[in-house]
Image (cartoon, rainbow, N blue to C red):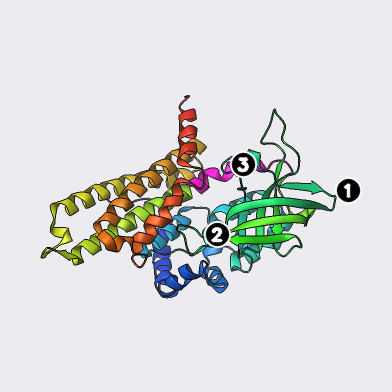
């Protein structure tokens, strides 16, 4: 069926991204995966291409687009080629919405031009050891100095994508203790300069998948953060995080769909070339039936994701809607990718084949941005259950 969610401008952008990936990513991707990060200079190339400035207003050096669909196209094209742009997805899809909505004018002028160019890369630090999805249970603190000029930040964070190479990190911390009546109150967001004394990058974590994105543990020991680097209002951090969750979860759903679609493509190409018992694998009825099932699944995921993309651009994607589309897309994509890997036989288990990387990469989509169990709870609550 004809896909209607993208217009001519979107498709022209898709061709640009596809060409860029073929020339600047695919030839080098095995090296990046082995290194556990993309080269820092690559982010500047993305800046030059305009990737980081799509949704940034023109006065700060961006294109001023408001549609999330351009970001979706990047996810689709990366999955199609079996690659990624490292930690840049966090930079644009997670960090940028906070800067655009909650930064004041002085902060936008100070941060956004470098954000757009790739000179300043960002990450966001929410998760802590021992707390997981319970953000209200965070223990990192930021205490205001007696003279009111800076906060003193102490604590630790983990699973921070882009944390090794980031220049600024949006750190969620307690500026006031939780109360029995409101566990979520007292959380603020500080945009921390990673060159600050006391700021430390710990282990670069060895992940199952997403090998080309750097993921780290961070620690803060009496880090002085100027009050000018407080994002938004003190104590409003949890509501800020909640506000951006629908887009974050939509982005994960888009990525899962794109990975499932890519898996079907890779498997279809493979079974046409691979010969077993004197016949191509594609000639066996089981192969045809499995891929037919997978195509139907991908078409269903695509339809759901496209509806969500339209709803988000129209400002109508609710928290429950985003949870439902993330739940469906990630759970079904896992099934599709597993089936497609099985059709590769032993070669599907080899990392030199993109299906193996997709299998590993997609597993985390059912965990980050809120686990599938959390998504089910959100959807059930929206049903009055």
In the image, is 121 to the left or to the right of 109?
Answer: left
Mark 1 sits on what residue?
146
Range of magenta residues: 234-249
Is residue 236 in the magenta section? yes
The reply to whether callout 1 and callout 2 are in contact (CB within 8 Å) is no
On whether residue 29 falls in the magenta region, the answer is no
Q: Count how many numbered circles sit on residues in the image.
A: 3
The residue carrying pointer 1 sits among few (fewer than 14), some (14 to 19) or many (20 or more) residues within 10 Å by Cα, namely few
The disc placed on residue 205 is 2
Quick one: label 1 or label 3, which is nearer the N terminus? 3
Task: Work out whether mark 1 precedes mark 2 in sequence or the reverse, and give the earlier one.
Answer: 1
Q: Nearer the viewer, residue 335 or 119?
A: 335
- In the rendering, at what x and y percent does residue 160 appear? 58, 55
Spatial CA distance of label 1 from label 3 is 27 Å
How far is mark 1 from mark 2, CA to CA?
Answer: 37 Å
**Vertical order, 67 against 21 (above or below):** above
* Residue lying at 38% horizontally and 63% vertically, measured from the top left: 82
* Residue ID at (48%, 24%): 384
Whether tag 3 and tag 2 are in contact, CB under 8 A, the answer is: no
Q: Nearer the viewer, mark 3 or mark 2?
A: 2
Residue at the (44%, 44%) spot, across then down: 326
Task: Identify the secondary structure beneath mark 3.
Answer: helix
Q: Secondary structure at mark 2?
A: loop
User: Regarding mark 1 in the picture, which secondary structure is present there?
Assistant: loop
In this rendering, the answer to whether 313 lies above or below 47 is above
Mark yes or no: residue 163 visible: no
Q: In this rendering, would 231 be left or right of 285?
A: right
Label 3 vs label 2: CA separation? 21 Å
Q: Position of residue 190 (x, y in %)?
A: 71, 52
Residue picked out by circle 3: 135
């Amino acid at each position: 069926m004809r896909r209607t969610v993208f217009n001519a401008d979107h498709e022209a952008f898709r061709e640009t991204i596809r060409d860029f990936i073929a020339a600047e990513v695919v030839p080098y991707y095995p090296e990046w995966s082995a290194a556990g990060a993309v080269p820092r200079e690559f982010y500047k190339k993305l800046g030059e291409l305009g990737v980081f400035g799509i949704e940034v207003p023109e006065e700060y050096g961006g294109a001023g687009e408001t549609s999330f669909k351009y970001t979706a196209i990047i996810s689709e094209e990366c999955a199609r080629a079996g690659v990624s742009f490292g930690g840049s997805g966090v930079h644009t899809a997670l960090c940028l919405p906070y800067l655009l909505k909650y930064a004041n004018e002085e902060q936008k002028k100070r941060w956004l031009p470098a954000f757009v160019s790739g000179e300043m890369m960002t990450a966001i630090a929410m998760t802590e050891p021992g707390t997981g999805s319970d953000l209200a249970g965070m223990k990192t603190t930021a205490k205001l100095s007696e003279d009111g000029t800076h906060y003193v930040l102490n604590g630790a964070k983990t699973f921070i994508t882009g944390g090794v190479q980031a220049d600024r990190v949006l750190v969620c911390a307690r500026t006031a203790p939780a109360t029995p009546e409101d566990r979520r109150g007292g959380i603020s967001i500080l945009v921390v300069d990673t060159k600050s004394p006391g700021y430390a990058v710990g282990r670069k974590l060895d992940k199952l998948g997403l090998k080309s994105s750097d993921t780290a543990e961070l620690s803060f020991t009496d880090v002085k953060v100027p009050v000018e680097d407080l994002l938004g209002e003190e104590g409003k951090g949890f509501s800020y995080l909640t506000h951006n969750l629908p887009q974050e979860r939509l982005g994960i759903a888009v990525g899962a769909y794109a990975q499932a679609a890519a898996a079907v493509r890779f498997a279809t190409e493979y079974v046409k070339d691979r010969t077993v018992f004197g016949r191509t694998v594609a000639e066996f009825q089981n192969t045809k039936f499995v891929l037919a099932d997978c195509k139907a699944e991908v078409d269903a995921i695509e339809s759901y994701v496209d509806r969500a993309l339209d709803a988000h651009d129209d400002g109508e994607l609710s928290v429950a809607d985003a949870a439902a589309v993330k739940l469906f897309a990630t759970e079904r994509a896992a099934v599709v990718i597993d089936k497609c890997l099985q059709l590769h036989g032993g070669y599907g288990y080899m990392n030199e084949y993109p299906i193996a990387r997709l299998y590993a990469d997609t597993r985390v989509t059912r965990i980050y941005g809120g686990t599938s169990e959390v998504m089910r709870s959100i959807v059930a609550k929206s049903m009055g259950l």
